[in-house]
Amino acid sequence: MNSMALTARQQRELDYHREHAAAAARQAFRPVGDDVIVSRQRRPWNAYWSMYDRLLACDLAGREVLVLGCGFGDDAIRIARLGARVSACDLSPESLAIAELRAQREGVEIVFAAMPAEALAYADNSFDAVVFVDILHHVDIKATMAEVARVLKPGARVIGDELYTHSRLQRVRDSAPVQRLVYPRMRGWIYGAQTPYITEDEHKIDEHEFSLVTERLTDLETDWFNILEGRLYPSRMIRAARIERAVMRPLARLGRLLAGRVVFSGRLAKS
Ligand SMILES: C[S@@+](CC[C@H](N)C(=O)[O-])C[C@H]1O[C@@H](n2cnc3c(N)ncnc32)[C@H](O)[C@@H]1O
C-alpha cells in the first residue's frame, strides 16, 4: 500500500471492504465468464455490455491498461483476455488477494497493487487506457481524476460504466414521501436480497462530479441507462429493459437528467 496516510473516507472504505472480502472469500473460486467479450449477440440495452462494446472497439491488444478500483478482478481478467497488458489497483489488499487468485486460476498475467485512487503509485504517462466500473462513487473524484490524468499518456482512452443521478432527481429521491412511502415498498421488488448501497460514503455521482470526470476528455461519447430499470422495475426484467432502451434512445438528451447510470468514453487531452 502507498505509504501516504489514508483519509478518513478511505479508511472507512478500507474497513468495509476488508470485511466484505472476508465474507466473500469463496469469490476466489468463481469463474470469470467471457460472454461479454466473445458473444456475437450483443445486449445494447445493458450498460455493462455497452461499455464492453466500447472496449472491444478500441482494440486493446498489447496496450497498457489500468483498471482502477478493480475489486475481485472481473474486468481486469476480461481485459487481459483481450490481450491488453493490465495493471489493476484497489484500496483493499483483501479484495486484491481474491483478484490475484482468480487471475492465476484463469491463466492471465495482471500486475495488481494496493493504493488509493487519489494517490496512485504509477509513473507519469504509463497507460494507454483506463477503465472505471462502479468505482467513481467511492472516491474523491477531483483528486482521482488529477491522478488519472497524470498516469495516462496523452490521447489515452478513458472508458467507464458508473452509477449516476442528476442532483435534481436526487432531491426527489431523497424527499420524505419517496423515502417513507415509495422506497420501502419498492426495495424488495427491485433489489431482492441484495443491499443497494454498501459503504456509508458512497453516493451516485451527480452532473457536477461527472463534469469533473469528463472535463479533460476529447471525443467524449456518453450513453445514459437505468432511467426506470433498477428504480421502478428490477434489472432481471430484460424485456422491460429492452423496451426502455428503445423508447429512451431517441430522447437521449433527457438522459443526463433522468438516468441512473452512464457509460462513457473519450480521450485524454493533456496540456
Ligand atoms: C463497488 S466495488 C467495484 C469493484 C469493481 N470495479 C467491480 O466492478 O466489481 C468498489 C471498489 O472500490 C474500492 N475502493 C473504494 N475506495 C477506493 C479508493 N479511494 N481508491 C481505490 N479503490 C477504492 C473498494 O475496495 C472496492 O473494491
Image (cartoon, grey):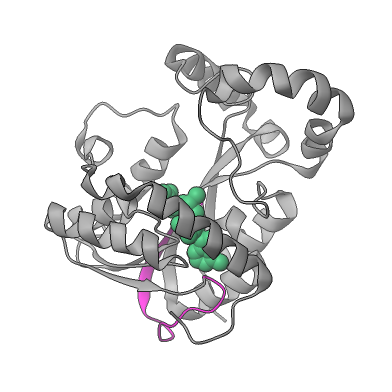
Question: Left of 151 or right of it: where is 173?
Answer: right
Q: Is residue 80 visible?
A: yes
Q: Residue at x 56, y 42 (%)?
A: 262
Q: Residue furthest left?
A: 107
Judge whether 3 appears above or below 214 on screen: below
Residue 25 in picture, x, y percent from top left: 32, 50
Q: Quadrant of the C terminus?
A: bottom right
In magenta stretch: residue 119: yes
Q: Quadrant of the N terminus?
A: bottom left
Residue 213 in picture, x, y percent from top left: 61, 61
In magenta stretch: residue 126: yes
Judge whether 183 appears above or below 149 on screen: above
Residue 10 in picture, x, y percent from top left: 60, 68
Question: Left of 205 or right of it: where is 78?
Answer: left
> Magenta segment, which residues?
117-134
Q: Residue at x 11, y 57 (%)?
A: 107
Judge whether 113 appears above or below 101 on screen: below
Q: Is residue 133 visible?
A: no
Q: Residue at x 46, y 60 (%)?
A: 18
Question: Left of 55 or right of it: where is 172?
Answer: right
Q: Nearer the viewer, residue 188 or 131?
A: 188
The mark total stands at: 0
Judge whether 100 appears above or below 121 on screen: above
Q: Residue at x 64, y 23 (%)?
A: 187
Q: Quadrant of residue 90?
A: bottom left
Q: Which is the main secondary structure of the residues drawn in magenta?
A: loop
Q: Quadrant of residue 9?
A: bottom right
